Image (tube, rainbow, N blue to C red):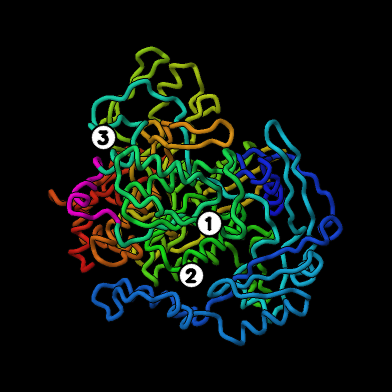
Amino acid sequence: MTLRALLFALTLAAAGTAGAVPYPQHGRLAAATDVGATTAVAASEPITVTVALTLGNAAQVEPLLEAVYTQGAPQYHQFLSAQQFAERFAPDAATLAAVTRHFTAAGLTVTRSATAHLRVSGSPAAIERAFGVQLHTYAVAAAGTSSGYRYHAPLAAPQLPAALAPAVRGVFGLDNRPRLFPHAHRAALRPRHQGGVPNTPDPPGAWTVADFADWYDVKPLYRSGIDGRGRTIGIISLAAFTPGDALGYWSSLGLNFNPNRINVVNVDGGPGPVCDDCGSLETTLDVEQSGGIAPGARMQVYLAPNTNQAFIDAFAQAIDDDIADTVSCSWGEWELFDSLNPFGNGPIANPVTGTDTSTLTALYDLLAQAALQGQSFFAAAGDNGAYDEQDELPPNYTQVLSVDDPAAQPFLTTAGGTTLPGVQTFSDPPGFSVDIAAEQAWTWDYLIPLCEALGLDPLGSLCGIYPAGTGGGVSIYFPRPFYQLGVPGMVNTEPHQKLYDESQNPPALIAALPAGFPGRNLPDVSVNSDPETGYAVWYTSSASGFSVEDFWGGTSFAAPQLNGVTALLAQGTRHRVGLLNVPLYRLLRQGGAYQGRNAPLRDIADGDNWYFYAHKGYDQTTGAGVPDVANLLEALRGLGF
């Protein structure tokens, strides 16, 4: 099977709830039926796609960004407004006119939706003419308690005229199947009792934001009046939630907050109703965690359907709105699928240069804009250790070292995960205990003895521990960014990473990943994310109603928690923090990250993520380590914030 055939097979997503489409379930493909040409099936239903254009003066973006984040430079922390960014970097009038003429000539309506984005709408037939594709509709049958749904997708990659292709970074919406994953996990083998350190009000497994604040030294900020007031937290998510869950969670902790603080912004019509299989718990925990850590902050929650088009549109709106000071997202997919997907969500083949554009490049442009505007962005590193693709491929494919997008993006902070110290005691077998001596990189390989005691294969599905753990590794797409240069511990991509389809005889080579590529290393910073030492979530299920669910974790918690922390840092420094990676890595280079009683970071030197090992300094499991939030604020002030 070729890479194109594999990616096309992955359009056959899991079935879902009426009115909302579920995210794909970890490598499980559902049968989909090609019901024919979209023009014949739904000729009267218009299709809208997003066309991402090349920025004007694109060569000036990165040099300006480095200058804005270089201490001592004249532009240091001279963040742009969204209007100023548009004035300098929006596509020029000639480009807009040429692209608009092409699409209007095909009978389509063109409107400006963001600084460098157009919305192009019309009949399926007109869309097919404009992009040189044939669209088909696919039906996924109902399965179990889930109803069926339909999506459309092109039979081949879209094409644009040679004169126009260089102006286009990506086209999104020709394929509208669900494809992104939330990075939340439930404990596989829950301990009956947790003892020893940490001595927090609630035991690990039932942690709240109050326990997080206790362990990571947030409380001194609260005592000094820093609670996020005057700042706005943004959330980007692909599933609906019940705002009352978050309000009840915060009230249960005695937090002081404005009950009208949450503003929901539905992008591209929104994701539909609350739906367990669609990821509604993800959105719920994102809001509860970020808003609970910074209870005084306002909240902008951008909700979109689970398509690449809506994902891009949500980022574009959050960035062009320029309301949120700090934003997190805990959804993603393997970066290879963003860079080499030929079925309608990028790439667009450029017949002049021979290069492709994709979701990766469109997000890159947007996040560069956000960094220039001083917005801080956070993404979850993923929950499958060093093998991110294990979420998305069926079991007959070999595993390769892989990382998630948008976590691999260079202009955001990637949140990794740890396991808390302490003794975990299990009921089965009776009295079985695991003792974690110190906070370590989260990977469930410490539960291998428990699986063996239960007579289960530690690497098998019945045990459920493999390959769960903090995402981390090296991007095969993005080169090492300026802030990671000169930082000890950086590595290049590993050799011999080949993806095979082993259902064929002999196994078919799908892709050979580049070896020795000096890519962006991730994660950047970490906090407790292990579900075994995880969190309680107040959640109203679409199936069973309200409950308080414990033993949830995943790097889905780390991203919104760091989002909330950064709202506090912004209040404490009296201005936006921007790209947090720059001061984090500056502290590492200057040797002040871990030293003394006021160290802003605590090094994590134990644990692994099934391939990379934690060690002193930066590593590909926990990045720069975990924050001491109060000390980090003082360190930022010392760096001129």
Q: How many marks?
A: 3
Left or right of residue 166: residue 421: left
- Front residue of this view, candidates 235 and 257: 257
Q: Which residue is mark 3?
A: 438
Query: Of tags 2 and 3, which is closer to the observer?
Result: 2
Contact between labelled residues 1 and 3, with CB atoms less than 8 Å apart: no
Could you tell me the amino acid type at mark 3?
Answer: Ala
Contact between labelled residues 3 and 2, with CB atoms less than 8 Å apart: no
- Give the residues drawn in magenta, as a range: 214-228
Would you say residue 223 sits in the magenta stretch?
yes
Q: CA distance from mark 2 to mark 3?
A: 43 Å
Q: Which mark is residue 320?
A: 2
Contact between labelled residues 2 and 1, with CB atoms less than 8 Å apart: no
Whether residue 515 can be seen here: no
Label 3 vs 1, first from the N-terminus: 3
Q: CA distance from mark 3 to mark 1?
A: 35 Å
Find numbered disc 1 in the image and state the secondary structure of the residue it sits on: loop
Q: Which mark is residue 514?
A: 1
Q: CA distance from mark 1 to mark 2?
A: 35 Å
The residue depicted at 48 percent of the width and 26 percent of the height is: 458
- Front residue of this view, candidates 367 and 282: 282
Query: Residue farthest to the bottom?
Result: 94
**Would you identify the image quadrant in which residue 632 lies?**
bottom left
**Residue 544, image x and y in percent?**
56, 30
